[in-house]
Amino acid sequence: MKMNHIFYFIFLVSSLLSCTIKVKESLKANQNNLVKYAKNFSLTIHENYICFELLNPETKKVEKKFALIKNDSIKIPEGLTPILIPIKSVIALSSTHIGMLSKLDACNLVKGISNHSYVHEPSVLESYNKGEIIEMGEENSIPVESIIRSKAELLMYSGFGKAFPHQEQLEKLGTICLANYDWKENHPLGKAEWIKVFGYLTGKENNAAIYFKIIEKDYLRLKKIASKLKSTPTLFSGNLVGDIWYSPAGESYNAILFKDAKGDYKYAHTKGTGSTENSFEQIFKDNVNTKYWFNPGVESKKELLKSQPKFKLFEAYKQNKIFSYTFSGNEFWERSAIEPNHVLSDLIRILHPELKLKNKLYFYRTLSK
Amino acid sequence: MTVARNNKFILFTLVLLFPILCGMHLFAGEITVSFSDFWNSVLNYNDENTSQTIIREFRIPRLTMGILAGGGLSIAGLFMQTMFNNPLAGPYILGINSGSSLFVAFSVMTGIPFLTSNLGTISSALIGAFIFGLIILSFSYLVKSHISLLLIGIMLGSFTSAIVSILQTMSEPNQLKLFTMWTMGSLQQVEYTELPMIILFFIVGIGLSLFMIKPLNALVIGESQALTLGIHVKYVRLALISITAILTGIITAYCGPIAFVGLAVPNIVKMIFKTQSHLTLLIGCFLIGSFFMLTCDIIIQVLESTIHIPINALTSIIGAPFVIVIVLKRLA
Amino acid sequence: MIELNGIEIGYKKRLFSIEDIQLSKGKVYSLIGSNGAGKTTFLKTLQGNITPLNGQILINKTEVQLFDRLKLSQTISFVNSKFDGVDYLRVYDYVGLGRTPYTNALGRLSEKDQKIVENALTELNIKHLSCYFTTKLSDGERQLAAIARAISQETDIIILDEPTAFLDYANRKLVMREMKKIASELQKCIIISSHDLDLCLESETDILVINKELKTLQHFISNTLSKEKLIEIGF
């Protein structure tokens, strides 16, 4: 399964199970909490260790607790899994992990990846070509031997609702498995905030905090600019899977970005953080005259028509207003999570040409012929 | 004879019901459209009018494909059942669909421009269906038992799906996406302007079928008996495989693999008409096959606001129990 | 009708030879021989499906090998030892299939065809079964229907491959009686292969026996052969 498909799949799964539980109250109790936007983890500073709590994305209950310690001899409470920091080696199975490590200049720690053809980061590719990085395959079918062979201290995986296979045995052998739920964060800044986890793990927590602050500031600045604009151009998003069209639901990551970019997203009112389903006819009726179409999942109009010839009836098709990030697929998946400000900037530039900003897009492009 | 008169009455009733069902299908969708929109969309089309566009570009092609897919696959199933003297035969179970799938997979994932064009997909689907028809035909000479042939068909299916999944791992994400889309099956891939060509293919296929009626009637009592009745069994089998390939290939190219229609409908038709006259069966299969498909699609459209069911999932859900009933009836 | 002159029967290997035998219209011939002697091969050779190793079979003075499929089906009809019936196939339609060599491209029965089918049904006294499904008949009735189908095919020659093998005594007698009646009334040449020596002798048909020692086919006119002699020659 290619990366795009995995994410598509995630949309599906999360649309089924989505629920929003307010947990801020419980977190506020702990003044030490270092997390502002992310909902799926917490970081708290204790006397001689840092507590990293992984929260279940659906129930928001604590799934696993880790104690990040700088020294083996430090005593920690029961029930916490110790991780000796800074870690010296890591298996990073998702593009976003590599993207975040790259921002911290920590890609030299990577010892294993899932598939080199999904990697953009040049330093990782270089190490892979030198044979210093092992390719492990898909997350749910990784041979245990190659994990052991990599001798990595930490394995970071996406954990599509499941524990990592052979997790306990691997931990006994010295590889701690850690799920990264950044993909379940709905707020763009929440996704980016996971860099703080990488910061503490690699001993570069200060860099991470500074980096996050910069991004946050930029994101909020762009949002403010957009909010003052008068025009709210209409837009829709997604593509057909079979006869069903999946659009991001109203409370999802994409919907938040569309809103922050001051776009009039057709399905902004829908409930849920996953996706919302419509028949093709319904999508056509709702969006035949919608101005912008985002994320069709293909790179050219030709491919678009090949997948469904009726797309040519859409106004967005006729006016060449279809925008996709798949031109820089690998790069997008690696960087978009940690650069939400750039994603937002792209959307604002596309939706609001009246701003007359210099036409520099980071990820998005108009569909080619 | 009274029997024949009875069947004529049933056929007549079905023909009368046909436009009603078509009408229901046309207007069943979530979005309400009016009758005048329908006439205008055909006779006086205004592409600015969304309702008219929905009818012309969405509903009419979908209706046509429903009729042709249901009717065509059922006729193909009838041919296979008579040819192999096996009530459980059908283009899907014998692996003829998988032939199309394999060749379409090849054509889509090679990325060669001609092959990835529409025409390329159609010709690959046709050729694939024909070749796999020939394969199953040659196996039918080697194995005597009905069940063995079905098992071989199912094995052909697994074999090709294995090859297809290997192809998938080697292909580019975009090509993979196109193929995955195709395998999901849909009656909505066809454009209004493509309909004349598809209908023409069907008229050819069904026109040729008329010449198969006599040999099919004779094949009912077995191949060796058909030979003594002066039937050129070898040529007839080739002709049947070719027609099946045309019907199955075209449908598979546009709608993706659709399961169980070809197996279940001919059996239902025989139960209703209680005859082996293939003229009656042929007309019956076309009508009841179309009815079956349109009904499935109406159900899908009615449920659309609550749940989205892919067409080949629904045909399987309804068709598979039928097959079990047939098997039980045989064994009892 | 059928001239068998200096012929060697066999498929790949030689089974037996025929010196000079003429089979004529209006008669029933019982073909007798031990298992493996070549009865089936002989019947297939008669139908033109297998070429004789030597010599030519002449039907109405023409080599059978030169017949095309249609001509063949208008000359020879064939009844299997067993017809299991087919779901939803009615007796009338089944017998009607005998008209296949004569009908148009769509296989529709003309009025004349229908008349012939009805006559065949009447001939065998199974007209009352016309509307029955072939699967619902008794074994005997089904065999009669198969014979009626052969009759409606209007061929000079009817070949029956062990037609009584699966029948009870009464039905065996009935089938043989009907065949004799048809042969004389409709002037057909009927060849029946059989294992049932008593039945063949009782029915007073001509006997064609494959001589086990000489490896030849011998022709005995009815009532000229005792059972003992027949066993001695054939088995």
Image: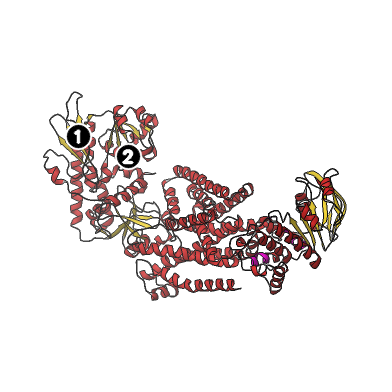
Looking at the image, tell me whether mark 1 or mark 2 is earlier in sequence order: 2
B244 up-or-down from B138: above or below: below
Determine which residue is flagged by label 2.
A94
In this rendered view, identify the residue nearer to me: B82 or C206: C206
Residue C29 in view of the camera: yes
Above or below: residue A54 compared with residue C210? above
Cβ–Cβ under 8 Å for marks 1 and 2: no
Residue C224 position, x and y percent, is 87, 54
Q: Residues within 10 Å of mark 2 (few under 14, many from 20)?
A: many
Give how far across and how far down residue B150 sits, in percent: 55, 50
Query: Residue B209 in magenta?
Result: no
| Residue tagged 1 | A205
Q: Which mark is residue A276?
A: none
- What distance separates the C-alpha of mark 1 from that of mark 2? 21 Å
What chain does badge 1 belong to? A
**Residue A115 visible in the shown view:** no
Q: Which type of secondary structure does the marked residue at label 2 adopt?
A: loop
Secondary-structure class at tag 1: helix
The magenta segment is C73-96
Residue name at image x 38 percent, y 44 percent: A2
Is B110 placed left or right of B139 in the picture? left
Is A231 rendered above or below residue C235?
A: below
The quarter of the rendered structure image containing the N terminus of chain A is top left
Q: Is residue C93 magenta?
A: yes
Disc 1 vs disc 2: which is toward the camera? Answer: 2
Callout 2: residue from which chain?
A
**Callout 1: 10 Å neighbours few (<14), some, many (20+)?**
some
User: Which quadrant would the C terminus of chain A be assigned to in this image?
Assistant: bottom left
The three-letter amino acid code for the residue at tag 1 is Glu
Q: Quadrant of residue B57?
A: bottom left
